[in-house]
Amino acid sequence: LVTAAVCPLPRESTLQGVRLTRRPRGRTQHRENSVSMFSVLPRLLPRAGAAWGACVAQQQAGLGLLGSQLGGSSTSGAVMSTFTAYDVGQSSNIKWHEGAVPTAEKEKLLGQKGAVLWFTGLSGSGKSTVACTLEHALAARGRATTLLDGDNIRHGLNKNLGFSAEDRAENIRRIGEVSKLFADAGIITLVSFISPYKRDRDSVRARLDPGKFVEVYMKVPIEICEQRDPKGLYKKARAGLIKGFTGIDDPYEEPDAAEVVMDAYDAQGKQRSPEVLAAELINFLEAKGYLEGHN
């Protein structure tokens, strides 16, 4: 059911002879009362403009469907319409609602283009280090970013997942959806996950608009990763204390065509620093127009 608590109102408000009564939180208003509120709220918020009108149109469309379901009569001045609900996965009778402010407008405000930079590679390949260094560099340029790290996400959102193939797939699916929300808001989103399976990474790519997903492959040999072993996990895996460890007894599927490949060594055989790799990514973002907003 559609509730009347669209905007906070005092318990009782009067506008040009129209009396509005706000019911206690959690109670559902009758459809006709809700529609009458939509018809007068633009007078309460005269500066809302076209964005408010778009929101009202969406709400009235929903109320139209509700009215048809309840068998109620139409209300004077209300736009009554219906939409078709559908099923997605285990969710039924839902419908996507577009926001009143499109992504391009948000990107114009931020002066950048939203995107997901997906750092993938073996444990110890430097994904989080380079992503963190890049975020600092972007912040210094006044860019809006967020950093989603695999270990951090497992502290909260994905703490109920293990490391089986099924759980790894769900781990990537969830963070892929979260990263899409950030990118659609115009945020440069840095995602640091081992994400060993190509199909899972490709599924995330498919959820974003073309050009919004940038795969960054940390191409570091496992020998170097084992030498680094910042969390001591390779040692435990070699000792048989950890099962299903990527690169040891579980596969890592290299990207076929990553947008950016971060090689561990330069042409002279010198190991490249996180600062050098971050600078390379800045150059990529500039060349591709990600650091410019829509005109």
Image (spheres, rainbow, N blue to C red):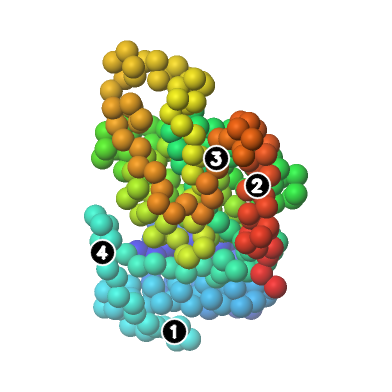
Using residue 207 as the reference point, say whether residue 133 is left or right of it.
right
**Disc 1: which residue:** 79
Q: Which amino acid, by three-letter code, is at mark 1?
A: Val
Using the rendered image of the protein, determine whether residue 148 is visible from the camera's viewpoint: no
Q: Which residue is mark 4?
A: 87
- Dot 4: what SS? strand
Q: Amino acid at mark 3?
A: Asp
Which residue carries the number 3 mark? Answer: 263
Residue at coordinates 49% horizontally, 20% vertically from top-left? 227
Asked whether disc 1 touches disc 4, contact meaning CB atoms under 8 Å apart, the reply is no
Q: Is residue 140 above or below residue 243?
A: below
The residue depicted at 45 percent of the width and 22 percent of the height is 226
Q: Check disc 2 and report the residue beneath it.
A: 280
Which of pointers 4 and 3 indicates the residue nearer the eye?
A: 3
Task: Identify the element where label 3 is drawn.
Answer: strand
Quarter-of-image position of residue 190: top right
**Depth-wise, is mark 2 or mark 3 nearer the camera?**
3
Whole-percent x, y for residue 129 in the image: 59, 33
Q: Residue furthest bottom?
A: 76
Q: CA distance from mark 4 to mark 2?
A: 43 Å
